[in-house]
Image: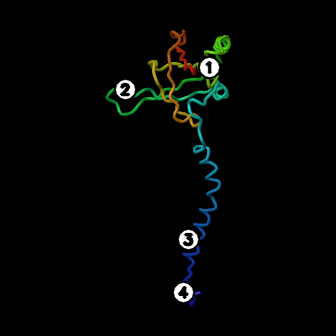
Amino acid sequence: MAENGIHVTRRSLLQIGGFAAALSSIPSAWRHLTVWTRAKPQLAELTAESFQPYEGQDFVLARPVAAGAIFSRSVELRLAKVAVHGRVAQIESRNPARYLGKRTRQSFSLHFELQGGEPLGDGLHRLIHRDFVGCQLFLSQVSKPRPDGTLLYEAVFG
């Protein structure tokens, strides 16, 4: 092969083999990466059905960044309940001239439980979850501490 100007050594063959092996692993790696890169729904597109499969699971929310701080602290909350507001739709159906076509989704609420830990303040908290990237939820405390110390928070989607 040297006469054609190509000099092949055992080392060069091993390098080519390693490169080929790396290329062959790309499809399986791509399959794992697409979970993180697939299009995520925007906040306005989320519905009660988007959250119902996650009832009973824990979510991590980042607290708002405190004044003078660089990083925010996170807190783990359990999604206790997804509640659909059927009453709102009934009220709006009574006056279709006023409400027809204005609502893009049915109203619903997410009810979260905080067990132990420092209570959250009302305000925007960033949801950290691979299926809900970039969601900012306005959480409000809706209960006094239970005897076991659990606090309830609600995020309302109009």
Q: Which residue is mark 4?
A: 5
- Residue 157, how many percent across, how many down? 57, 22
Please give the residue where the numbered disc 3 appears in the rendered image: 15
Name the mark nearer the viewer: 2 or 1: 1
Report the residue at 61% width, 53% height from top: 29
C-alpha distance separating marks 2 and 3: 52 Å
Looking at the image, do the residues carrying marks 1 and 4 touch, with CB atoms under 8 Å apart?
no
Residue at 52%, 15% in the rendered image = 151
The picture quadrant where one finds residue 87 is top right
User: What kind of residue is marked 4?
Assistant: Gly
What residue would you read off at disc 1?
A: 108
Where is residue 123 shown, x and y percent of the image? 45, 21
Q: Callout 2 environment at 10 Å: few (<14), some (14 to 19), or many (20+)? A: few
Picture coordinates of residue 92, whole percent (x, y): 64, 14
Give the image's coloring scheme.
Answer: rainbow
What label does residue 66 carry, if any? 2
Q: Amino acid at mark 1?
A: Phe
Closest to the observer: 63 or 38? 38
Tag 3: residue type? Gln
The residue at 63%/27% (across/down) is 47
* Helix, strand or loop status at disc 3: helix
Residue 146: which numbered mark, if any? Answer: none
